[in-house]
Amino acid sequence: MADVVIVGASIAGLATALAMGGAGHRVRVLERADAPPQGPPGEVALDWDRPTVPQAVHSHTISSSAVAVLRSRVPRLLERLTENGAELLDLLDALPPLVTDRAREVGDEELVALACRRNVLELLLYRTAQELPHVGIEHNVTVRGAEFDPAPGARIRSVTDADGRRVPADVVVDATGRRTESRSWLEAAGVPLAPDLTVPSAMTGFSRHYRLRSPGRPAPLNRGNATAGVWDHYAAALHPGDNGTFAIALMMPTGDRETASLRDPAAFGAVARATPGLGPWLEPGVSEALTPVNVIACPPNTLRGTVTDRQEPVAGLFAVGDAACVTNPLFGRGMSLALRHAFELADLIGTGRVDHATSRAAARLAERVYLPWYEAAARDDGRRSALWDASRGISPAEPAPSSGSAPSPGPAAGSGPVQLRDAMLSDAWVWRAMTRSVMGLRPPAEVFGDEKFLARVRQAPPVDPALIPSAPTREELLGILASSGGAG
């Protein structure tokens, strides 16, 4: 068995520790932050201060692909999550009203998601990994560098912390998030870095967490795991969490000064209440705010060149989660991709020798896991950015769909966003195909390369626009901000 050092104890690092430790490897996790709080996860999650993980305060989703990993790899963790207030969501509850054939089908059991705040998932992931006999987690340890055998045939031998301590390892996993510290280690060792793929998300997010005052949902979830929409000038999503909590996120163009006042709670609440499907959740007496409005400049979509087959391999060095690939948080794929990658990487390493062939195979694995979703995010963000720029008079754009009820289409020749939306609203087969893609079970390019799918989209009858809720126009949205006292 290998000596494994994992740098970073967030979602990706802990999942890798769970996977590697469960396979019998000796695992040391080195984390620069303090240990997480003790106590019931649903209660202490809100007070967990995460200066090294600023995105933890924002809305997160646990999609069908992540639930599939939990069910098959760590069912006990899934049980602990539900015992602590997380809820499995049946996505079939969101079958559109116009769908006439509502019978269950084989395969529908995978169309589930998990309502759970990120901090609750992370706390229970931490505790489950820590219980493994071969896993140790050290806190307040900052890794500054790494030691490699010289090229050719480079191999990682150890990492070094800020105190100069050398920690030997057969395998080092970079789980440092978007910083991808392993790039600086390789650069310092003189190893050429393969270039990254990157496309801006061009989006700023405003989010806030709430708790319902009584059981039940004030309104249905139009996505099964969320109420969400992407329009020609903004996007919005409401995600239920554990223990009666939920989060609302409003996404605006980066640099849009006219909507910057959404950081004000009154302005945020006014726009959220005016957004289709969200208002009932914010009626007086229905819910209470748990957090201030938090703001995040969404990072660019990035696939690190160092994790791909374009990088000259360094035996024993791997990156997982955001250290390997970042996609726009709007799509809610980050945690699910990290969970999948962690366990598949552990499978690949197995119990054999970790050599350059293993590193080559790991690069192919990373491309299989991340590249389809990076490409989808880059494409969709490019189209959405053009629409949003056009709404502000910055540049021309393609015509926008009249509702955000359908995801942006892929390369579906002969069909457009409105046709896709109408097909999803009336055809259960199309709805299932798109839901599997949105939930990470089937890559978008595969869905849109299916001739049967394309034919059914083209054949779908048009839906009366009066049946589709409309969001405020940009002018109306700015008026709402002004009347709430949050203009400019």
Image (tube, rainbow, N blue to C red):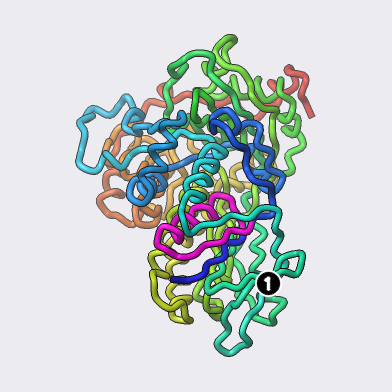
Q: Which residue is rendered at x = 41% and y = 63% of the image? A: 24
- Mark 1 lies on a secondary structure that is strand
Q: Is residue 386 left or right of residue 218?
A: right
Q: Is residue 409 left or right of residue 143?
A: left
- Residue at the top extreme of this rendering: 285
Residue 419 percent coordinates (x, y): 38, 40
- Residue at the bottom extreme of this rendering: 152
Q: Is residue 39 visible?
A: yes
Residue 471 percent coordinates (x, y): 55, 26
Residue 350 part of the magenta segment = no
Residue 136 percent coordinates (x, y): 55, 56
Q: Which residue is rendered at x = 53% and y = 18% of the image? A: 212
Q: Which residue is rendered at x = 61% and y = 67% of the image? A: 196
Residue 428 percent coordinates (x, y): 27, 36
Specify the segment rendered in magenta.
8-30
Q: Which residue is rendered at x = 61% and y = 56% of the image? A: 8
The residue carrying mark 1 is 166
* Residue neighbourhood size for the residue with mark 1, other residues' Cα within 10 Å, grouped as few (<14), some (14–19), many (≥20): some
Position of 102 relative to 217 (above/below): below
Position of 480 relative to 177 (above/below): above
